[in-house]
Image (cartoon, helix red, strand yellow):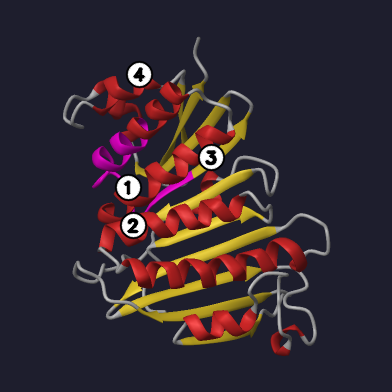
Amino acid sequence: MAGSPNVRLRLGNRAENVLLVRQALSGLAEAVALDPVALNDVSTAVTEASNNVVLHAYEGEEGPLEVELTVVPGGLDAVVRDHGVGIRPGVKDAEEISGGIGLPVIQALSETVEFRDLPTGGTEVAMHFEAAAGNAPVQTAAEEGATLEAIDHGTPGDVTLMAVGPTSVARGVVPRVLSTLAARAYFSTDRISDTQMLADALVAHTDGQVLSGHLAMGVSVAPRNLEIKVGPLRAGRGDAIFGDAAIDGLGPVLERLTDGHTVSPAGSAEILDLRLAQRG
């Protein structure tokens, strides 16, 4: 795949996280006006590959599930990766890989599928789909500075990490993923709506403030609480969000919707840490 993926997800290999993958796919599809039939094929194949990581890659232990989605001319590339035992011996030729519809259907739904054994252990399942998009192909930007590593702020598997770009894609993906995580935190309907408004504001007003064309987020979920790290912001922009009206009034929105914030350095960049709690 050329360039950086439009969507990068690093999740724990938990069954509930497959829904986050599907939400990200739906948001990407909306951003590029992907044909609904094509979206169904992509979603089914990527879901099955993700389920295999959940069920088999770590032999009952926890580990990372990584997903990358990239819009390319005339189609979509998807990679599902684990760092565990990979696809078990014989599974590539077996009738099923995950107790579901199985590898033959993944092969049928994708134009090509390739299995790559990783040097450090694990497997990449690289799929290419021919899928007409109603919008022009999204150009990916080269990532710079701090991204997923800088915003990882918890025990492996406990933090949802994503990097999404450009803004046209983030606008579809970020609100869906954050709203799903807010529901997982047992937020009320009103507070889930607040979380979606927060996501919309972050995407709209941090364009041009991040060091790369990709907005990176790390989200930690606890009952009635979310902690969201956002970056990598240009030096000085974190504090300026709350004090500089030139950033389109983002500060007042964050002050109203969140329950506290801090700004921390990450090399030459800054990371904005937002806290949301269930209210009432």
Give the structural element (helix, strand or loop) at label 2.
loop
First of labels 2, 4 by sequence position: 2
| Marks 4,1: beta carbons within 8 A | no
Rounded to the nearest angstrom, the CA distance separating label 3 from label 2 is 17 Å
Q: Which residue is mark 1?
A: 210
Q: Nearer the viewer, mark 3 or mark 1?
A: 3
Q: Residue at x 66, y 58 (%)?
A: 64
Q: Which residue is mark 3?
A: 219
Q: For the N terminus, which image quadrant? A: bottom left
Residue 136 point in image, percent of width and height: 19, 70
| Marks 3,2: beta carbons within 8 A | no
Residue 265 visible in this rendered orientation of the protein: no
| Label number found at residue 165 | 2
Give the structural element (helix, strand or loop) at label 3.
strand
Q: Identify residue type, mark 2.
A: Gly
Q: Which residue is mark 4?
A: 255
Asked if residue 41 lies in the magenta stretch, the reply is no
Give the structural element (helix, strand or loop) at label 1.
loop
Residue 161 visible in this rendered orientation of the protein: yes
| Marks 2,4: beta carbons within 8 A | no
Q: Residues within 10 Å of mark 2 (few under 14, many from 20)?
A: many
Rounded to the nearest angstrom, the CA distance separating label 3 from label 1 is 18 Å
Q: Identify residue type, mark 3.
A: Val
Q: Is residue 160 above or below residue 242?
A: below
Q: Nearer the viewer, mark 1 or mark 2?
A: 2
Q: Residue at x 50, y 9 (%)?
A: 280
